[in-house]
Amino acid sequence: MSQPWLFSRSTDLWVFGAPALVSLLLVAAGLAHGDALGDLPAGLWLLTVLAVDVSHVWSTIFRTYADGDEVRRRPLLYLGTPLLAYAAGVALHLAGGAALFWRVLAYGAVFHFVRQQYGWVRLYRRRGGERDRLGSWLDGATIYAATLVPLLIWHARLPRKFHWFVEGDFASGLSPRVVPVACALYAALLSAYLGRALLTRSTAWGKHLLVGSTALCWWLGIVSFDSDFIFSVTNVLIHGVPYFALIWRYGRGRWAGQPGTVAGIFRLGWGAFYALLVAVAFLEEGAWDGLVWHEHAQFFGDTGLELGPLALALLVPLLAVPQAVHYLLDGFIWRVGPDNPGLAERLDLR
């Protein structure tokens, strides 16, 4: 039976609608108080970057390494990916310095963020029983335009006051002349998407919410303003919060009625699940700050350590392994089909 919502109406509104609404309210509050055009304040960094972005990276463990059966099913994938990520990171750092390492990681993150929004659209189409080719093409093209066109404009307007990871991580040199063409194409796709929804009287409310919130947040966060604050809050929340929900839904289905520590975490409830992820994220960010960034001593203390280039070339890729593995594995672990037996049932997408 087709459904207009991926999880349920209330859950989808909380998972997809609420993060977008909160991010817009934070932008409005920041603009009203004169803070929004600067850097992300430390307290808001803690609540968004650490408690959402970094924490959601670690949630992947419940789909992968915390499941012994899953690791044994694909040992090369799960054991080889972190080794490959670290080796490649060290090689990049040694060959091209920190700049090359962060550029490659930034584009890996971009690919991951864009593909996640497309993946949600695909899941919504499956849930809604949508099988038509025209709709599939238009849905995909629209969500890609909603993410890629702002990124293209970002590249055409470098340098900006914000960056993905570090200053200069995106390549410059794209001609601004491509912007009008890209915007015209984007407007045409959005118009076609809306027109088709009206003509077919589509009730795929969850999918429409996803497409609309993605288009609004990515445009505001990247195009409308040149601000680290606004980019961060519009980027992080709509990406991380839905991923928590996906992992939670999967974990409840996977570990229901099972013994053991992992199953116990899901039996304890959402609070225990989330608190554990935040605790691990805090430890990771403490290592980053104490050894590399030295930006948030008010949260992690001041180690006073200043590492040399070789030490950083070995350490930075190691600290980046969790997020690199998250980006890489996501291309394999959420494909509904024979490669992931039981996934559709655990997500209730049958």
Image (cartoon, grey):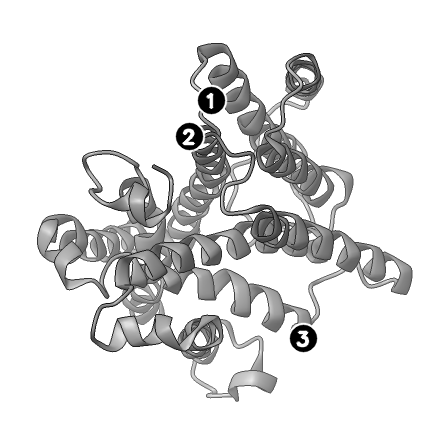
- What's the residue at 27%, 58% (across, down)? 254
Q: Quarter of the image containing the C terminus?
A: top left
Q: Secondary structure at mark 2?
A: helix
Q: Toward the viewer: 180 or 303? A: 180
Q: Are marks 2 and 1 in contact (CB under 8 Å)?
A: yes
Q: Residues within 10 Å of mark 3 (few under 14, many from 20)?
A: few
Amino acid type at circle 3 is: Gly
Q: Nearer the viewer, mark 3 or mark 2?
A: 2
Q: Which mark is residue 126?
A: 2
Instruction: Answer with left or right where residue 4 lies relative to residue 270.
Output: right
Q: Residue at x 64, y 38 (%)?
A: 209
Relative to residue 152, is residue 39 depicted above or below?
Answer: below
Categorize mark 1 by other alpha carbons within 10 Å: few (<14), some (14-19), many (20+).
some
Relative depth, front residue between 107 and 136: 136
The disc placed on residue 3 is none
Q: Which three-letter amino acid code belongs to the residue tagged 2?
A: Arg
Pointer 3: what residue? Answer: 43
Classify residue 322 as left or right of residue 74: right
**Looking at the figure, which quarter contains the N terminus?**
top left
Q: Is residue 152 above or below residue 308?
A: above
Check disc 1 and report its element: helix, strand or loop: loop
Residue 130's label in the rendered image is 1
